[in-house]
Amino acid sequence: MAKRWTKQEVTYLTRYAEKRHVAELAERFRTNNDEVSKKLAELGLEAKDSASIRALPPDPQLEIFEQGLKALHQGKWQEARKYFEKILGETGESDLAQRSRRYLEICRQNLVKSGPKNSDPFLLAVYESNRGNYDEALALCSRGGRQGKDERFAYLAASVYCLMGDLEKASKFLALAIELNPKNRIHAYHSSDFEVLRDSSEYRHFFE
């Protein structure tokens, strides 16, 4: 459905379009890049990166990001989470990945608020970890051998063990998580949960 623009939004576009990127404007107005580009063309305006966007072919990752934003704004946390996780699973440390990581955390926080009503075992494990119920979180990670075959549970187990101060087990499961998905090395490097592990010379090689 086409976006219906308010007078306030049009005024904002008129004043600030040239100082903002299309994606920033789309995020502000809770719509997608195409809708913003159409309105800018209608008003005879250009965003900061309009020229470069016209010169580039469509970016599949950007389309996924926009779908995630749409789901996020609709409060569909589970659906939005899947889109942002997909981006993080396929990109490195791009600006899009950094944004996706921030929005993924918002999704997780809102899903955690639903507590045990959520049937996703991974989200339940995250919920228990965030509550400080580390034993329960680890039990959920290990049930059915999840942490040995699913990189999400291996990574979460590593995180929990690190928070508990058990660096030996934390390193064991982080090694497994990285083996299952090399991008977990990057995630761990940027996560405060692994700060103690990063500061240890014995385990520093995990982050290099």
Image: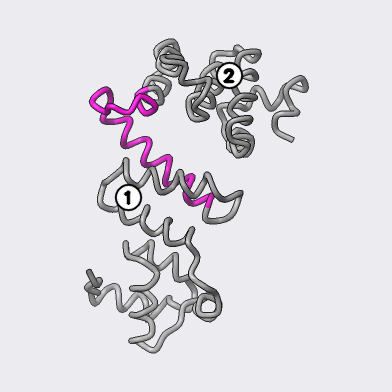
- Quadrant that contains the N terminus: bottom left
Q: Is residue 133 visible?
A: no
Instruction: Provide the secondary structure element on which disc 1 rests.
Output: helix
Percent coordinates x, y for residue 25 in the rendering = 40, 68
Up/down of 128 relative to 14, above or below: above
Q: Horizontal placement of 52 versus 81: left or right? A: right
* In the image: residue 117, left or right of residue 139: left
Residue 199 visible from this viewpoint: yes
Task: State how far apart marks 1 and 2 are (Cα).
Answer: 30 Å
Report the predominant secondary structure element of the magenta stretch.
Answer: helix
Image location (x, y in percent) of residue 81: 38, 43
Q: Quadrant of the C terminus?
A: top right
Dot label at residue 162? 2
Residue 141 on the magenta span? no
Instruction: Give left or right: position of 119 versus 84.
Output: left
The magenta stretch spans residue 121: yes
